[in-house]
């Protein structure tokens, strides 16, 4: 048997998360005994198939020929075992070499030393056998040798690739953060582009950047070998290289390319809002010779209409930012992408690759499948969407679709019973207090982690994010049982039930709409006050029901006083203070969305903006820098900050546990003699700084601020009454 026909052991490396699809690809390309490991796949094949894999693999980084696997306990053993390999069979003294070494041990403390010892072994052996030695070229060697030390085992192999296989040779220009070519190919495989292409579907990338996804998609559709345009491969300097075998594979690939482009029938288009990036895309497309079949054009995402094809794949890698502050800038982009998909891409599949799931949620689409992948070191998700309706529209469709009476699961029956019991218990209190907005259920049953609020003739359901110990399938099943239970409990409200997912919000996320359906606003009555409620568009409704008693307390205490409301949200507490007879008020927030909402609440209650001002400011900065004209001192202050904020609108990051002492001292500096400050937050693990308690008179009044509907969940918020010690006295009753 000649050398080329003998099966040998090989290793294909790849980005983490691609192992399974790489194994499938290797199997198709002629490999046998394929076995996956972390970020690599072991296999066996002949030299012919190894060449074919180097030429045709769209997913691998490198193809390595295994030469030796040894146990090493000492530095001398590393040298000896490396020198036992017959290097003269694989390279000559005229070749240049480089050693890539990974792993350490108690005796080999750094990779540079390990690489040096392997290099010494290679060149010493060749000097002994041939009388001369190869030279080292770390930048562009003829032969690259890999050595990996792990748990006392050294694996040594020869790199057949040369440069990483993801470098196809067409990268003439690139954007700021281009996808590697093999990762782009993996996204297309996971999104089932090969199947969609076979069915004649189109492909579109609305944020195409340097066109990597477009080029890889066209190469798949046209049967173009990804390695056909590379300058060289590592095996071309290998002593056993068979040039005739290699030329035959190249000739076959070139013929397939010509035929593929001749029969090219796919509509593959890319768009971007950045003309500089599009120029890079055009250069890349021209470099690979696909300018006759690929089209790119300048178009922002908000100008997208219906595609010309009835079916296809929209795939994109939108920016997802490296810092928390980037989220608020990028959220509108994802929101607009969701709008475009919902409006124009019914019948298509969408694939979004992102490293920020909070941004992905802004699309208001529910993924049908998702895959964990890595873009370099960044953990990312490929989200696939087959239903282009908004999450709420999907749920409403399910509720609205006539169906035979559904047999409830035991869990759903248990939930219906709990809702009925809770409503019966709250009934007398609701009637006596004339309350029609209240919390009916708050994760009373651990299996059903939702909060259910009643707003007159509507239900507002917030799904808590499941813990990591609950798999996604089980969480979705439980949520489906919640939907079934509510349809059974209140069938007349099924078209007025709003479902949202509740989780920690950062930056501008908390201000963004949750979906794009028509706004559903209504009025809530609380004592003398009326408030605008939005049940459909945002995570929160505009009224924190758990602060009902605190607002009532403020209404009583505010008469004739100057009231300051910091982080005022929709200023519901300020409305109650004004209606209670406050002399004046100042309500501060940095969100235009909230302040506009607050102004509408003022108008509903005939509150004068002359005496009751709304100001858009960074509350932290304002407390430190405000002057007399801002209203220097206040008799009553409400401080209700978020648990965490990293918005670019703020000068600094707010972490309430870390920063509350300084925030309280700054707020107390604005409190007039004899005044009261109420401090509230929603951080369940919050602990008051002992220094604050020593400096001021601090009383935890949380229990007294929980109305009947929130007494089952005493951790929903924390509230303190804080005064200067000389004025601390008995609480005013509500």
Image (cartoon, rainbow, N blue to C red):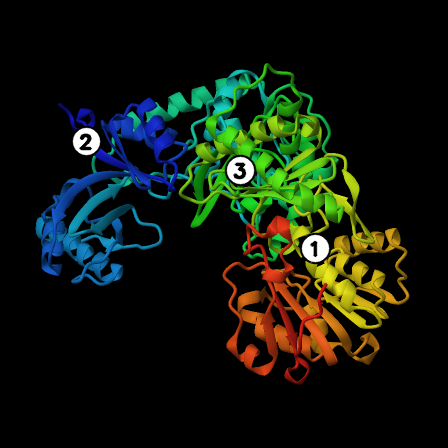
Task: Please identify, in this view, whether the residue under mark 3 or under mark 1 is nearer the observer.
Answer: 1
Question: How dense is the environment of label 2, judged by Cα within 10 Å: few (below 14), some, or many (20 and up)?
Answer: some
Q: CA distance from mark 2 to mark 3?
A: 33 Å
Residue 690 place in picture, x, y as percent:
51, 77
What residue is disc 1 on? 548
Observer-side mark, 2 or 1, equals 1
Q: Say whether residue 232 is left or right of residue 103.
A: right
Towards the viewer: 134 or 577? 577
* Tag 3 near tag 1, CB within 8 Å: no
Residue at left offset 63%, top offset 45%? 277
In this view, 664 is above or below 492: below
Is 609 displayed left or right of 427 in the figure? right
Callout 3: SS: helix
Residue wearing tag 3: 212
Q: Of 623 and 560, which appears nearest the observer?
A: 560
Q: Residue 462: where, in percent of width, then height?
A: 60, 42
Residues at badges 2 and 3 in contact (C-beta under 8 Å)?
no
Is the residue marked by circle 3 packed among few (<14), some (14-19), or many (20+) residues within 10 Å? many
Residue at image x 70%, y 63%? Answer: 567
- Residue 8: image tag: 2
Q: Nearer the viewer, residue 191 or 131?
A: 191
Dot 1: element: helix
SS of the residue under disc 2: strand
The quadrant of the image that shows the C terminus is bottom right
Where residue 519 appears, as percent x and y from the top left, is: 76, 38
């Amino acid at each position: 048997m000649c050398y080329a026909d003998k099966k040998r052991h090989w290793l294909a490396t790849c980005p983490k998360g691609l192992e399974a699809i790489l194994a499938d690809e290797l199997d198709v390309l002629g490999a046998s005994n394929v076995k996956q490991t972390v970020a690599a796949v072991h296999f066996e094949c002949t030299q012919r198939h190894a060449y074919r894999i180097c030429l045709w693999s769209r997913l691998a980084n490198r193809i390595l020929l295994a030469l030796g696997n040894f146990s090493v306990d000492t530095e001398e053993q590393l040298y000896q075992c490396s020198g036992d390999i017959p290097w003269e069979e694989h390279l000559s003294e005229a070749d240049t070499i480089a050693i890539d070494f990974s792993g350490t041990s108690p005796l080999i403390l750094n990779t540079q030393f390990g690489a040096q010892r392997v290099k010494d072994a290679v060149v010493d052996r060749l000097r002994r056998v041939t009388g001369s030695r190869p030279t080292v070229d770390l930048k562009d060697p003829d032969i690259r040798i890999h050595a990996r030390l792990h748990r006392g085992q050294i694996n040594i192999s020869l790199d057949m690739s040369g440069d990483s296989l993801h470098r196809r040779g067409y990268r003439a220009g690139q954007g700021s953060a281009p996808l590697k070519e093999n990762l782009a190919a993996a996204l297309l495989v996971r999104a089932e582009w090969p199947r969609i292409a076979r069915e004649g579907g189109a492909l579109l990338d609305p944020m195409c950047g340097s066109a990597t996804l477009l080029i890889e998609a066209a190469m798949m559709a046209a049967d173009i070998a990804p390695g056909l345009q590379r300058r060289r491969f590592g095996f071309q300097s290998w002593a056993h290289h068979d040039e005739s075998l290699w030329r035959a594979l190249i000739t076959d690939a070139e013929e397939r390319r010509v035929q593929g482009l001749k029969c090219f029938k796919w509509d593959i288009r890319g768009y971007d809002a950045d003309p500089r990036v599009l120029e890079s895309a055009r250069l890349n497309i021209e470099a690979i010779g696909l300018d006759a079949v690929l089209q790119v054009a300048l178009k922002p995402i908000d100008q997208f209409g219906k595609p010309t094809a009835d079916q296809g794949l929209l795939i994109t890698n939108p920016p997802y930012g490296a810092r928390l502050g980037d989220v608020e800038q990028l959220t509108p982009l994802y929101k607009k992408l969701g709008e475009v998909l919902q409006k124009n891409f019914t019948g298509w599949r969408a694939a979004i690759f992102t490293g920020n799931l909070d941004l992905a949620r802004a699309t208001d689409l529910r993924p049908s499948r998702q895959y964990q992948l890595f873009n370099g070191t960044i953990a990312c998700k490929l989200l696939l969407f087959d239903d282009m309706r908004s999450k709420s529209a999907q749920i409403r469709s399910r509720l609205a679709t006539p169906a035979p009476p559904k047999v409830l699961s035991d869990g759903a029956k248990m939930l219906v019973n709990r809702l009925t019991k809770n409503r019966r218990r709250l009934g007398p209190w609701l009637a006596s207090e004339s309350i029609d907005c209240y919390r009916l259920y708050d994760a009373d049953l651990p299996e059903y982690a939702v909060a259910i609020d009643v707003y007159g003739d509507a239900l507002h359901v917030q799904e808590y994010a499941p813990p990591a110990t609950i798999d996604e399938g089980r969480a979705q099943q439980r949520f489906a049982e919640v939907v079934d239970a509510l349809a059974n409990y209140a069938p007349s409200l099924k078209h007025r039930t709003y479902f949202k997912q509740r989780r920690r919000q950062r930056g501008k996320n908390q201000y963004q709409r949750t979906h794009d359906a028509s706004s559903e606003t209504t009025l809530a009555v609380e004592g003398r006050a009326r408030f605008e409620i939005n049940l459909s568009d945002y995570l929160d409704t505009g009224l924190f029901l758990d602060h009902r008693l605190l607002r009532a307390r403020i209404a009583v205490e505010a008469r004739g006083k100057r009231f300051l409301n910091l982080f005022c949200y929709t200023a519901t507490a300020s409305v109650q203070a004004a209606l209670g007879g406050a002399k004046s008020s100042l309500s501060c927030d940095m969100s235009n969305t909230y302040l506009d909402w607050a102004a509408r609440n003022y108008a509903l209650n005939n509150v004068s903006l002359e005496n009751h001002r709304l100001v858009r400011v960074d509350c932290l900065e304002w407390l430190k820098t405000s002057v007399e004209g801002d209203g220097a001192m206040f008799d009553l202050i409400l401080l209700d900050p978020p648990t965490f904020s990293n918005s670019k609108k703020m000068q600094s990051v707010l972490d309430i546990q870390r920063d509350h002492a300084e925030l309280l001292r700054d707020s107390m500096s604005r409190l007039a003699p004899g005044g009261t400050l109420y401090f509230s937050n929603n951080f369940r693990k919050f602990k008051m700084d002992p220094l604050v308690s020593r400096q001021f008179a601090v009383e935890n009044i949380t229990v007294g601020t929980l109305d009947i509907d929130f007494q089952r969940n005493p951790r929903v918020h924390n509230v303190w009454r804080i005064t200067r010690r000389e004025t601390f006295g008995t609480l005013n009753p509500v």
